[in-house]
Amino acid sequence: MDGVLVINKASGPTSRDVVNEVGKILNTKKVGHTGTLDPIASGVLVLCIGKCTKLVDFITSNDKEYIASFKLGIKTDTGDITGKVIEETKVSLRSKEVKNVFLKFPRVYNQEVPIYSAIKIKGKKLYEYARANEEVKLPSREVAIKELELISFKGKIITFRALVSKGTYIRSLINDICKKLNTIGTMTSLIRTKQGEFPLDESFTVKEAISGKHKLITIRELFKDYEQREIDGEFLTKIKNGVLIDYDFEDYLVLTHKKDIIAIYQKYEKDPKFAKPLIIF
């Protein structure tokens, strides 16, 4: 059983919980997710099944869209409403100020990774430092905020939509927005509405997967819009060994043998005249 399953994760379970449950439903241990959703978060969780687990890194690199809400004037140790309150302050903001921050917020910047995350420093996950009350310098990395839209500002609650690059933490984005507003805030809800080409309205709940109403997207369906080339003989052996090839195409090239997909190739960044394997099956 090979393919991609787009799950609509409920708020509560971890991403690993969903992976384990789907693995039991499909009777396979070869299940991988393509971007962690915190327990508080819901929405699109793309799972790769069987041979498609080789696509995890490829799909993880796609942009992600979220709708998030946060409460002004309160800060927790985890950055979301499930954490312990560590600071509170009065808030007095006008709609015009909030709109202005969203309009002028930087589209590319270095974002600090939140302490409650699974990023490893010296072999230890950041949340392990947090739970042990150990100090650690938080790493930062460049992220792209491709779209940022203020949806509503009611009372102390701000709701917004964001389309972001791989590696962007919405809790950190909220923290940075609050800094621009000269206040503090904490995330109250988060929905991933899209990952790459996988939208929320084409996802399935775990309950639907249990009842058999789910649909696996096959490797062929995933790459149906890209050029395909049938190969055999000596070239087939070379492809299975992962050689670079000199072949002109756009984006991705699907190589087949007896109509079965054996490899997906992409442009070689060091020399665009050549292509390198994205995946070899």
Image: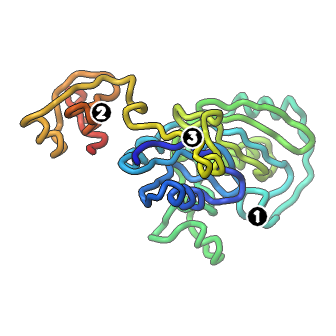
The front one of 276 and 125 is 276
The front one of 246 and 124 is 246
The picture places residue 269, in percent across and down from the top left corner, at: 29, 34
Q: Amino acid at mark 2?
A: Gln
Q: Amino acid at mark 1?
A: Gly
Tag 2–tag 1 contact (CB < 8 Å) = no
Residue shown at 40% from the left, 45% from the top: 2
Residue 66 seen anywhere in this rendered image of the structure: yes
Quadrant into which the C terminus falls: top left
Sequence order check, earlier mark of 3 and 2: 3
> Does 86 sit left or right of 209 as displayed?
right
Q: Which residue is mark 3?
A: 109
The picture places residue 202, in percent across and down from the top left corner, at: 60, 34
The picture places residue 192, in percent across and down from the top left corner, at: 65, 42
Q: Amino acid at mark 3?
A: Tyr
| 222 in relation to 27, above or below | above
Instruction: Identify the element where label 1 is drawn.
Output: loop
> How far apart, in angstroms, are the residues tagged by discs 2 and 1?
43 Å
Residue shown at 56% from the left, 38% from the top: 195
How would you rate the neighbour count of disc 2 (Cα within 10 Å): few for under 14, some for 14-19, many for 20 or more? many
Q: Which residue is mark 2?
A: 266
The picture places residue 182, in percent across and down from the top left corner, at: 80, 46
Residue 108 seen anywhere in this rendered image of the structure: no
Tag 3–tag 2 contact (CB < 8 Å) = no
Q: Which mark is residue 83?
A: 1
Residue shown at 53% from the left, 47% from the top: 167
Sequence order check, earlier mark of 3 and 1: 1
Q: Which mark is residue 207?
A: none
How would you rate the neighbour count of disc 3 (Cα within 10 Å): few for under 14, some for 14-19, many for 20 or more? few
